[in-house]
Amino acid sequence: MMAALAALTGAMAFAGGAMAQIAPRSNAPIDIAADQSDAFTKECRVVWSGDVEALQARTRLRAQKLSVYSARKGDDCGETERMEAEGQVYYVEADRTVRADSAVYSASSETITLSGGVVVVQGRSVARADRVIIDLKSGQSQMFSATKGRGSAQRVRGIFYPSGQPN
């Protein structure tokens, strides 16, 4: 019982380091829910698994697994350095939805890199790529494909609707 209490206390203290920013320009707390959470205190890592959902303000991150890595601060764990999401990743902002196989959030650069079959939907417009980098500070996105050349079906591709145009 004491070991379980010590583990829970350590996990709660370590979970405080999960206060990263996935919502642009928000100081709202992050609410993470999952089927399971495992804290690896010596590694400054918490792994959430099973239909994970992280919410901050109006931004949502869904995945099958979310690993949160914090910086070592002496004998303790400090601020979040990065988060890695795997398996059916969805990143949803107010006006944009992104789907990918995996995603990495970097606190130092305030970017999210999504990889593997990336589909971005904004309004009626849709774009596809192998990899997308979203800069949370500026809102700028970059899309990349491993395939080059006019005949390749896997290049970066988009269908965009001008505003005010009928269907």
Image (cartoon, helix red, strand yellow):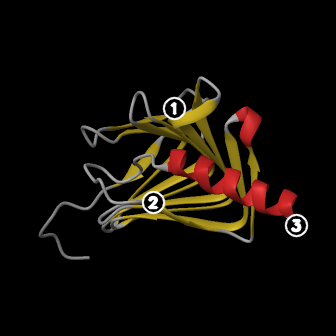
83 or 147, which lies in front? 83
Q: Residue 12's spot in the image, x, y percent?
A: 62, 57
65 up-or-down from 41: above or below? below
For mark 3, does the 10 Å Cα neighbourhood hold few (<14), some (14 to 19), or many (20 or more) residues? few
Count residues near mark 2 (Cα–Cα under 10 Å), then give few for <14, some for 14-19, many for 20+.
Answer: many
Residue at image x 39%, y 60%?
29
List the residue tagged with mark 1: 150
Q: CA distance from mark 1 to mark 2?
A: 43 Å
Q: Position of residue 17 (x, y in %)?
A: 53, 44
- The quadrant of the picture occupied by the C terminus is bottom left
> Along the line of sight, which residue is nearer the eye, 26 or 77?
77
Q: Is residue 74 left or right of residue 49?
A: left
> Circle 3 is placed at which residue position?
1
Query: Mark 2 and 3 residues: CB-CB less than 8 Å, in contact?
Result: no
Label 2 or label 3, whichever comes before in sequence order: 3
Q: Which mark is residue 30?
A: 2
